[in-house]
Amino acid sequence: MNRRGKQLADHRTRTDDGLSTDVYDQPGHLIRRAQQIAVSMFYSIMGYEVTPVQYAVLRILQEHPGIDQVTLARLCALDTSTAANLAVRLEERGFLRRMVPMKSKRFRLLHLTPQGASLLKKVMPAQLLLRRRLLQALNQKEQRIFMRLLKKFVHLNNEESRAPLDRGELRDSSP
């Protein structure tokens, strides 16, 4: 073992209940690293036309055309000011339209533009490749377990987020 490896090994300790105190064994650190990896893979496969969050916004608008910015924020687990800023930027780039309804000038309804729909059509096959690449190190059983546990973790800790996901409106209207 080289000197650096020995120094790292010397700092690895365990708590009384056997849990590692090594930073590389901490869930938060591993989640942050997983996010870094996912974002890096996103850009290498999907390109640089949109960010991962912008892609999610466009996909939500594809599935729910005409929703308002507050609903978009809830469906994307974003705070309302971030969702509004994203909508403005995506409108400036020609990917969506923000429309003020006749009844109320207090909010904006959002629609994909033909350019936004075209972008999604172009990158959707890449999204499937991205999913495969993100999970390829795991066998199929591990992939199913990983996805089930990741969804469970996110669902059970949703309220800890500064912008919790809220799909309530959609859930209430579905059969």
Image (cartoon, rainbow, N blue to C red):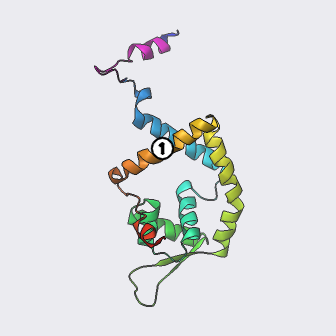
How many numbered marks have been drawn onto this rendered protein structure? Answer: 1
Q: Quadrant of residue 9?
A: top left
Specify the amino acid type for callout 1: Leu
Q: Is residue 36 visible?
A: no
The part of the chain drawn in magenta is 4-19
Say what secondary structure mark 1 lies in.
Answer: helix
Identify the residue at horizontal 46%, vertical 86% (top origin): 101
Q: Compared with residue 14, is residue 100 higher up or lower down, i.e. above or below?
A: below
x%, y% of residue 113? 62, 75
x%, y% of residue 95? 61, 70
x%, y% of residue 41? 62, 44
Q: Which residue is mark 1?
A: 150
Q: Residue furthest left?
A: 16
Q: Is residue 119 visible?
A: yes
Q: Nearer the viewer, residue 14 or 51?
A: 14
Identify the residue at horizontal 63%, vertical 34% (top origin): 139
Identify the residue at horizontal 71%, vertical 56% (top origin): 125
Q: Compared with residue 143, is residue 113 higher up or lower down, i.e. above or below?
A: below
Q: Compared with residue 83, is residue 30 higher up or lower down, i.e. above or below?
A: above
Q: Is residue 46 magenta?
A: no
Residue 166 shown left or right of residue 175 in the figure:
left
Q: Is residue 6 magenta?
A: yes
Q: Residues within 10 Å of mark 1 (few under 14, many from 20)?
A: few
Q: Residue furthest bottom?
A: 102
x%, y% of residue 154? 42, 48
Q: Residue furthest front?
A: 175
Identify the residue at horizontal 58%, vertical 73% (top origin): 96
